[in-house]
Image: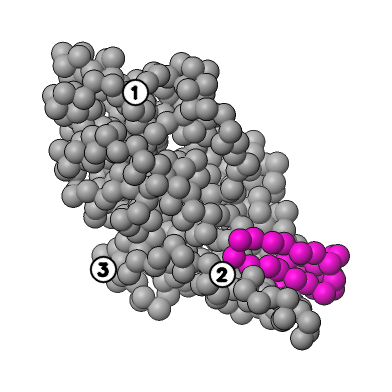
């Protein structure tokens, strides 16, 4: 059910409680829009250790979220962190800056003997209090760690189409067998665990995806940013972002641009940020080849309306220069790119029944159109192009929702609280007090 933005401040962080995990070497006060954390200056009691497992270090949503989470934990808690990544990737160096990392693929290649591998692994892992698997794919090595006799948490970022295509059945069975509790990154993900994998709803907690809040300068005119980035001027800029393959619906992105052109819209340009892997992905090739998409753009005069920018480090610059974010994904649990766009005050158009983004968009931060209905998406784009005041209103609400619901410093304490419950740790003296009437509370204390 929709929660009006005006009421969100009253409920944000309501469930948070003091937790042993917070480092309290000195009195601290951490202020967020939703809550304040106060401690009495006591030292951190005991050593708590979490072993995180990620499936790789590629530049994608679940991996970026894990990196943000462990960075926050490293900076704000006394938790000892160890990381196992099944494979490497471009983010590996950033993971290593935070905590020790073991690459599983290299590890089992170097130590094929199971007994010797166990000894080396035990030395690296130590005695964690909790194993935290980030994605269903991470469950692939749960059986290798069962000797530790500690609880497993699986943070699920996948929906069923991706699970069917990319996750082996043995890995799914390991997830079901070993996981004590689940975090679902969106409501549809939680429902999928329940309906398609027979997971007890009592074991599932939904904590929506989150990103770190950036300091954003809104004083620079969009035209200046557009000129700096080489984007079109005096036209509607529609942005898409993510790895270019079937799930992200890049073919639907192209089709929507074609519909706009046929409807007579000329002052627009679609820009897509992300790595091109279409032809290396079998599921994408089942739709068509990338060459076919290139020919479609060429024959329909779309080359002057669509640009694929590749991977960009400065995505926020593009979002600030753009007008609208279009998410044509066939399946997307809760894409971080939409939160980045919302942080930059641009609204989102997405498909219903494709994942969690309609829960964010609702009816005041963009539009959720019928599933794969590119004609309806095109109509909404034309509407916003003709009603720039409404476009700005939706963008402003999108930013407000991000700030109130999806910031790292709101979600990370919720995950800490969740982990504390799973391992049944006793909290240290720490109090989280909602902003509302907090002065009266501290006077009473």
Query: Do the numbered discs 2 and 1 sit on residues whose CB atoms are within 8 Å?
Result: no
Task: Answer with left or right where residue 62 lies relative to residue 350.
Answer: right
> What whole-number distance in Å separates the C-alpha atoms at marks 2 and 1?
41 Å
Which of the labelled discs sits on residue 13, or is there none?
2
Residue 138 placed where, x, y %? 47, 53
Task: Answer with left or right where residue 110 lies relative to residue 18.
Answer: left
> What whole-number distance in Å separates the C-alpha atoms at marks 2 and 3?
28 Å
Look at the image and say whether residue 23 sits in the magenta stretch: yes
Query: Which is nearer the eye, 60 or 407?
Result: 407
Callout 3 crowding tier (Cα within 10 Å): few <14, some 14–19, many ≥20: few
The residue labelled by disc 1 is: 235
**Foreground tag (2 vs 3):** 2
The coloring applied to the image is one colour
Callout 2 crowding tier (Cα within 10 Å): few <14, some 14–19, many ≥20: many
Query: Do the numbered discs 3 and 1 sit on residues whose CB atoms are within 8 Å?
Result: no
The residue labelled by disc 3 is: 195
Q: Quadrant of the N terminus?
A: bottom left
Write the residue at 73% across / 76% down. 439
Query: Do the numbered discs 2 and 3 sit on residues whose CB atoms are within 8 Å?
Result: no
Query: Element at badge 1?
Result: loop
Which of the labelled discs sits on residue 407, or is there none?
none
Residue 42 placed where, x, y %? 84, 73
Write the residue at 61% across / 58% down. 409
Part of the protein shown in magenta: 18-47
């Amino acid at each position: 059910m929709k929660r009006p933005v005006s009421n969100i401040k009253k409920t944000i962080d309501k469930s948070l409680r003091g937790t042993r995990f917070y480092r309290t070497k000195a009195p601290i006060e951490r202020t967020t829009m939703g809550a304040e954390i106060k401690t009495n200056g006591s030292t951190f009691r005991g050593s708590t250790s979490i072993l995180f497992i990620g499936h790789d270090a590629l530049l994608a949503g679940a991996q970026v979220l894990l990196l943000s989470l462990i960075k926050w934990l490293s900076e704000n808690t006394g938790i000892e962190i160890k990381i196992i990544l099944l494979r490497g990737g471009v983010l590996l160096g950033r993971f290593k800056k935070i905590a020790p990392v073991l690459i599983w693929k290299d590890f089992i290649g170097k130590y094929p003997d199971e007994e010797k591998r166990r000894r080396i692994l035990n030395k690296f892992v130590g005695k964690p209090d909790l194993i935290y698997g980030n994605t269903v794919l991470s469950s692939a090595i749960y059986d290798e760690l069962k000797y530790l006799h500690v609880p497993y948490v699986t943070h699920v970022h996948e929906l069923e189409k991706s699970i069917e295509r990319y996750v082996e059945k043995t890995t799914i069975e390991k997830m079901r067998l070993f996981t004590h509790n689940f975090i679902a990154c969106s409501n549809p993900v939680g429902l999928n665990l329940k309906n398609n994998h027979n997971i007890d709803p009592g074991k599932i907690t939904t904590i929506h995806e989150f990103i770190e809040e950036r300091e954003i300068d809104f004083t620079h005119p969009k035209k200046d940013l557009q000129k700096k980035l080489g984007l079109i001027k005096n036209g509607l800029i529609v942005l898409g972002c993510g790895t270019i393959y079937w799930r992200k619906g890049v073919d639907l992105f192209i089709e929507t641009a074609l519909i706009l052109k046929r409807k007579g819209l000329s002052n627009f340009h679609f820009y897509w940020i992300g790595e091109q892997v279409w032809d290396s992905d079998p599921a994408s090739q089942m739709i068509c080849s990338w060459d076919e998409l290139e020919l479609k753009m060429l024959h329909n005069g779309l080359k002057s309306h669509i640009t694929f920018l590749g991977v960009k480090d400065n995505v926020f610059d593009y979002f600030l220069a753009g007008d609208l974010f279009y998410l044509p994904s066939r399946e997307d649990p809760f894409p971080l790119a939409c939160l980045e766009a919302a942080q930059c005050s641009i609204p989102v158009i997405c498909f219903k029944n494709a994942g969690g983004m309609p829960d964010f968009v609702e009816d005041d931060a963009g539009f959720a159109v019928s599933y794969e209905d590119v004609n309806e998406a095109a109509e909404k784009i034309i509407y916003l192009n003709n009603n720039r005041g409404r476009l700005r209103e939706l963008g402003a609400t999108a930013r407000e929702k991000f700030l109130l619901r999806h910031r790292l410093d709101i979600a990370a304490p919720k995950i800490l609280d969740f982990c504390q419950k799973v391992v049944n740790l006793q909290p240290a003296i720490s109090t989280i007090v909602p902003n509302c009437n907090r002065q009266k509370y501290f006077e009473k204390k």
